[in-house]
Image (spheres, rainbow, N blue to C red):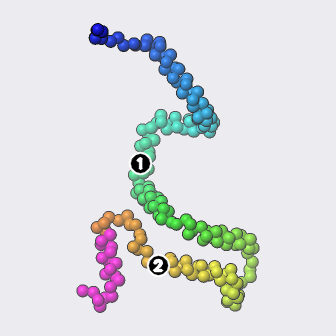
């Protein structure tokens, strides 16, 4: 019958063997990622040529001073409003339907191209010329498009607005708006 194993000796690498193993592991990783490393070195070389590395070294070397200047700059009311406006604009850009906007932008580009080709003259346009121009199908389409656009701009979009006001301020403004909308003889 076999005896139970009571003493287990662990195989430990000497520091020299461990270093060789680690070096081999790093070497294999370098070989496996050769293309990525070469691209990274090329990018770092370009950054060095343009002085970006010197700039970054200076920024990190003077980190506390740079951070202090940045905090003071952002602490100004204009900077705070700029950041708020930027965030609001980014949120608004997310609501634009680019597929609907594309045809309008193409027409706008076409109109700008025609204006660029047109030389300025002292010639004046009379009322008769305007009426005559409305018979031109392209002008008529543009005027119809402009009128449709103006009608869309005139629509009440207050329900779609995303306000940055506090909820209690929104209630006050709604009450004031409702009071203005109710004729004086109908008020309580």
**3D distance between C-alphas at marks 1 and 2:** 43 Å
The percent coordinates of residue 166 (x first, y second) are 32, 64
Q: Which residue is mark 2?
A: 155
Quadrant (top left, top right, bottom left, bottom right) of the N terminus? top left
The percent coordinates of residue 133 (x first, y second) are 69, 85
**What residue sits 39% from the left and 73% below the top?**
159
112 and 34: which one is in front?
34
141 shown above or below 16: below
The percent coordinates of residue 94 (x first, y second) are 48, 62
Q: Which residue is mark 1?
A: 72
Q: How many marks?
A: 2
Left or right: 121, with 17 as reference point: right
The percent coordinates of residue 109 (x first, y second) are 66, 68
Quadrant (top left, top right, bottom left, bottom right) of the C terminus? bottom left
The answer to whether residue 39 is magenta is no
The magenta span reads 170-188
122 and 156: which one is in front?
156
**What residue sits 28% from the left and 11% below the top?**
4
**What residue sits 32% from the left and 80% below the top?**
178
- Mark 1 element type: helix
21 shown above or below 177: above
Q: Residue furthest front?
A: 1
The answer to whether residue 187 is magenta is yes
Q: Is residue 173 visible in this depiction of the protein?
A: yes
- Mark 2 element type: loop
Q: Is residue 48 visible in this depiction of the protein?
A: no
User: Taken as a whole, is the magenta stretch helix, strand or loop?
Assistant: helix
142 and 177: which one is in front?
142
């Amino acid at each position: 019958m076999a005896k139970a194993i009571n003493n287990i000796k662990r195989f430990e690498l000497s520091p020299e063997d461990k270093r060789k193993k680690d070096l081999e592991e790093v070497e294999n990783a370098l070989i496996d990622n050769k293309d990525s490393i070469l691209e990274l070195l090329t990018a770092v070389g370009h950054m060095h040529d343009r002085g970006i590395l010197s700039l970054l070294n200076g920024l990190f070397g003077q980190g506390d001073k740079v951070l202090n200047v940045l905090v003071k700059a952002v602490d100004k009311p204009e900077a705070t409003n700029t950041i708020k406006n930027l965030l609001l604009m980014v949120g608004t850009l997310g609501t634009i339907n680019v597929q609907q906007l594309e045809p309008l932008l193409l027409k706008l580009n076409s109109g700008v191209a025609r204006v660029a080709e047109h030389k300025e003259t002292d010639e004046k346009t009379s009322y008769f010329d305007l009426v005559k121009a409305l018979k031109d199908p392209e002008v008529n389409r543009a005027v119809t498009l402009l009128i449709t656009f103006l009608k869309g701009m005139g629509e009440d979009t207050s329900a779609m607005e995303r306000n940055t006001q506090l909820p209690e301020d929104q209630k006050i403004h709604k009450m004031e708006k409702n009071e203005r909308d109710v004729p004086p003889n109908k008020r309580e």
